[in-house]
Amino acid sequence: MEAEGFWVRRAVKVNLSQDEKRQIGKTSAPRPSVDMVALHLARGELLALEAKSYADTPGVKLAQMQEEHELPTGRFKLFTSERYRSIVLARLKQDLVEAGMALPEMQVRLGLIAGKVNQGQSQAIRELMEARGWLFWSPDDIKAKQQAAQNEKA
């Protein structure tokens, strides 16, 4: 992502207030963490990315991404709980703006970088993510981006 002009931060903690925790139904929850935040200032693009490798599992499954939960549950909370997602992403943006790391008019776009996807489900997951306005990188996308970066160095 940095090769594409993004500023990147990893494991970004989101500072939810007690009231925000109450709103999501988890008053004793630890601070949420977003795996990667990427900002491309020239394009006005602000991404909140979850990275899932699942090397020793069948990978990300479409059914997991289609789940909907009132209370944040499971590995894909940002994707499966609308209330949790809206509160966490709004607070993330507020934290970044207050720190001078993002502009107030920027919108946060959610995304998933999947190192492994259950057999044959990459396209269906991509379609689901695109329909919701989210970014999705499949294992093939990751390989292509790595190859392109290596070719630029050569």
Image (spheres, grey):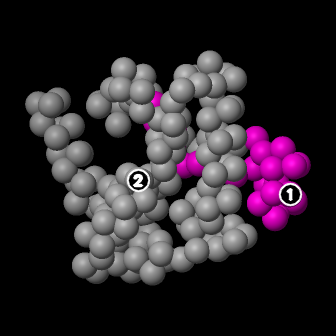
In three-dimensional space, the C-alpha distance between marks 1 and 2, rounded to whole angstroms, equals 27 Å
Q: Secondary structure at mark 1?
A: helix
User: Does the image show residue 11?
Assistant: yes
Q: Which residue occupies the foreground of this view, 8 or 132?
A: 132
Q: Which residue occupies the foreground of this view, 142 or 42?
A: 42
Q: Residue at x 59, y 48 (%)?
A: 34
Above or below, 103 relative to 148: above
Looking at the rendering, the stretch of residues picked out in magenta corresponds to 15-39
Residue 109 belongs to the span the image colors magenta? no
Q: Which residue occupies the foreground of this view, 4 or 135?
A: 135
Q: Residues within 10 Å of mark 2 (few under 14, many from 20)?
A: few
What residue is pinned by disc 1? 22
Q: Residue at x 87, y 49 (%)?
A: 19
Is the N terminus in the top left, top right, bottom left or bottom right quadrant?
top left
The image quarter containing residue 23 is: bottom right
The image quarter containing residue 126 is: bottom left
Q: Residue at x 48, y 50 (%)?
A: 110
What residue is pinned by disc 2? 133
Q: Where in the figure is residue 75, as x and y percent of width and height? A: 58, 68
Which labelled disc corresponds to residue 142? none
Q: Residue at x 45, y 81 (%)?
A: 63
User: Does the image show residue 122?
Assistant: no
Which amino acid does the dot numbered 1 rest on?
Arg
Above or below, 4 relative to 120: above
Q: Where in the figure is residue 5, as x and y percent of width and height? A: 33, 26
Above or below, 40 relative to 100: below
Q: Earlier in the sequence, mark 1 or mark 2?
A: 1
Is the C terminus in the top left, top right, bottom left or bottom right quadrant?
top left
Q: Where in the figure is residue 116, as x and y percent of width and height? A: 35, 68
Which amino acid does the dot numbered 2 rest on?
Gly
